[in-house]
Image: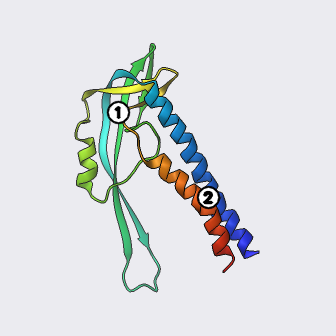
């Protein structure tokens, strides 16, 4: 029974990661293939700090992990309609950095108030993005999504 519970929980998570990875991979391909340059205005550009803590009282010290990620928002008009987007790259998977300086470096070309070039697919005008480069996130999600269900099945055998 434990094997099935483990497989359902972690295997289901793996299938969800696989689904997100595949959909983002094809969205990223489409957005890059049909890219049209547009002018946008940066309205938010900041580094967000995230701290995750291990609160296990049995540990002698508190293990916490701090990561930083660039967060931005820009506005633009396309086809007579106003839009806003927060995509740095052409997918929704955002990667974090170990240092605030590294995350800030990505935002350096995009200060608040700047008018910069962005890209969009005319068929999906609400998904504009700033950097015309592939992100590794979809591939990582697909690999983890493929590996997690069999790993969950194997580990469930020993629980």
Q: Is residue 79 left or right of residue 146?
A: left
Look at the image and tell me whether residue 159 can be seen: no
52 and 26: which is toward the camera? 26
Tag 1: Cα neighbours inside 10 Å, few (<14), some, or many (≥20)? Answer: many
User: Does dot 2 land on a helix, a strand or a loop?
Assistant: helix
Which residue was labeled with disc 1?
130
Q: Is residue 44 left or right of residue 28?
A: left
Which residue was labeled with disc 2?
13
Give the percent coordinates (x, y) of residue 1.
77, 75
Give the percent coordinates (x, y) of residue 17.
57, 53
Q: Would you say the residues marked 1 and 2 are in contact, meaning their CB atoms lie under 8 Å apart? A: no
Kindly report the distance in space between the C-alpha atoms of the residues bearing marks 1 and 2: 30 Å
Q: Is residue 135 left or right of residue 97?
A: right
Determine which quarter of the picture holds residue 4: bottom right
The residue at the point 37 percent across, 71 percent down is 64
Ranked by sequence position, the earlier of labels 1 and 2 is: 2
Q: Residue furthest toward the right?
A: 1
Look at the image and tell me whether residue 2 can be seen: yes
Q: Which quadrant is the C terminus positioned in? A: bottom right
Give the percent coordinates (x, y) of residue 106.
27, 44
Mark number, residue 84: none
- The scheme the figure's colours follow is rainbow
User: Does dot 1 land on a helix, a strand or a loop?
Assistant: loop
Q: Is residue 17 above or below residue 78?
A: below
Give the percent coordinates (x, y) of residue 127.
47, 30
């Amino acid at each position: 029974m434990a094997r099935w519970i483990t497989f359902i929980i972690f295997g289901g998570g793996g299938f969800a990661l696989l689904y997100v990875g595949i959909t983002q991979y094809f969205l990223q391909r489409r957005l890059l293939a049909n890219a049209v340059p547009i002018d946008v205005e940066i309205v938010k550009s900041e580094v967000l700090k995230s701290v995750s803590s291990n609160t296990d009282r049995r540990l002698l010290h508190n293990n916490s992990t701090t990561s930083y990620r660039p967060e931005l928002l820009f506005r633009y008009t396309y086809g007579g309609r106003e839009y806003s987007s927060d995509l740095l790259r052409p997918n929704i998977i955002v990667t974090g950095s170990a240092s605030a300086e590294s995350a800030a470096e990505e935002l350096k070309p995009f200060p608040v108030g700047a008018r910069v070039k962005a890209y969009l697919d005319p068929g999906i005008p609400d998904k504009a993005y700033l950097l015309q480069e592939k992100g590794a996130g979809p591939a990582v999600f697909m690999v983890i999504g493929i590996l997690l269900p069999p790993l969950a099945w194997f580990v469930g055998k020993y629980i």
